[in-house]
Image (spheres, helix red, strand yellow):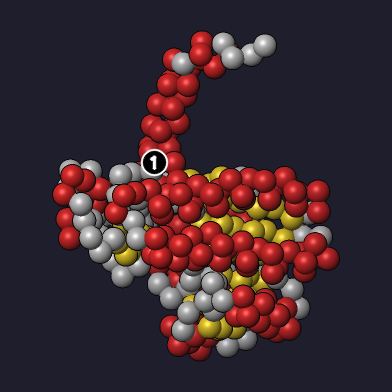
């Protein structure tokens, strides 16, 4: 396997942490980041020659620029960017707090865009690179109570699809990854929710509030296996536009797309009736 330089955001816990470990174990140079660099110091201590630990809040333009500059100074280039930093937010659409929702988009979507724009000049110059955007099956399933989170991921996937077409002629690829439920901190520490619940949504969005959610710790997905799979897919040089990870995500993807296609076909007569 050709050695590459990876830059991964959100490495303190979860899939980002598992991916950082897998990439480092495979021998690649890796920039491991978290909002507090102390959260990734153990990774650097274990791989002093190949790991660079940096404090990075993806909503801070100065930190984004600094992280990419320091990565390129230390390792000469960035071959793979993984936009993994992000968090969940549970609220019925009507319950969402405007400031909370803007913060969510700033991190999950605009933070990823800032990272992409920061690494692309180097990737264009070297005419190679891979951009991996961690989405969620939520982008497709859109469960009640996760409208805003799902919206950040759906927007990321649409952007990734266009980006892939723009950068492909330049030797660069972009892919989105839709994980299902993995046994990480996502449903624990990394999940926020609306402060005020509206009673009318108790049976929909309310069932997925943290105090009612029993999923945490029982998810089917193994983060370590997901990480190894991702490293292999990127190394293959054949990264797909969309990679679904987890049997639950695959089942959900098929169910949603089949249902949507059936509905579109049922209304096809209306769709075609509007032409001149």
x and y percentages locating residue 32 in the rendered image: 55, 77
Q: Residues within 10 Å of mark 1 (few under 14, many from 20)?
A: some
Is residue 255 visible in the rendered image? The answer is: yes
Residue 248 falls in which quadrant of the image? top left
Q: Nearer the viewer, residue 199 or 213?
A: 199
Number of numbered discs on residues: 1
Q: Is residue 223 visible?
A: no
Give the secondary structure at mark 1: helix
In the drawing, does residue 123 fall left or right of residue 273?
right
- Residue drawn at the location 54% of the way across and 17% of the way down: 271
Question: 66 above or below 136?
Answer: below
Q: Position of residue 65 (x, y in %)?
A: 67, 77
Q: Is residue 158 left or right of residue 246?
A: right
Q: Position of residue 9 (x, y in %)?
A: 53, 70
Residue on which disc 1 sits: 141
Q: Quadrant of the N terminus?
A: bottom right
Does 22 sit above or below residue 207?
below
Q: Quadrant of the C terminus?
A: top right
Residue at the spot x=38%, y=48% of the render? 147
Location of residue 64 with respect to 197 vertically, above or below: below
Estimate the x, y position of residue 90 in percent, counting from the top left: 31, 56
Q: Could you say which is closer to the camera, residue 224 or residue 72?
A: 72
Residue placed at 40% from the left, 52% from the top?
A: 148
Q: Quadrant of residue 119?
A: bottom right
């Amino acid at each position: 396997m050709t050695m590459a330089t990876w830059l991964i955001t959100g490495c303190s816990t979860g899939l980002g942490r598992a991916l950082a470990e897998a990439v480092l174990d495979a021998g690649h140079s890796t920039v491991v980041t978290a909002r507090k660099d102390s959260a990734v110091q153990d990774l650097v201590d274990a791989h002093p020659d190949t790991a660079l630990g940096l404090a990075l809040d993806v909503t801070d333009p100065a930190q984004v620029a600094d992280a990419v500059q320091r990565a390129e100074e230390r390792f000469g280039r960035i071959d793979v960017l993984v936009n993994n930093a992000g968090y969940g937010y549970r609220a019925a659409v009507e319950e969402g707090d405007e400031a909370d929702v803007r913060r969510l988009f700033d991190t999950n979507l605009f933070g990823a865009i800032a990272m992409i724009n920061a690494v692309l000049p180097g990737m264009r110059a070297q005419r190679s690179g891979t951009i991996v955007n961690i989405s969620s099956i939520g982008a497709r399933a859109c469960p009640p109570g996760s409208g805003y989170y799902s919206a950040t991921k759906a927007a990321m996937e649409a952007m990734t699809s266009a980006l892939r077409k723009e950068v492909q002629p330049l030797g660069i690829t972009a892919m989105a990854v839709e994980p299902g439920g993995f046994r990480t901190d996502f449903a624990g520490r990394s999940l926020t929710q609306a402060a005020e619940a509206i009673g009318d949504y108790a049976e929909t969005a309310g069932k997925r509030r943290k105090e009612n959610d029993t999923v945490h710790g029982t998810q089917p997905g193994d983060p370590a296996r997901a990480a190894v799979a991702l490293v292999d897919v990127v190394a293959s040089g054949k990264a797909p536009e969309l990679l679904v990870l987890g049997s639950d995500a695959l089942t959900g993807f098929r169910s949603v797309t089949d249902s949507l296609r059936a509905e579109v076909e049922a209304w096809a007569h209306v769709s075609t009736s509007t032409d001149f």
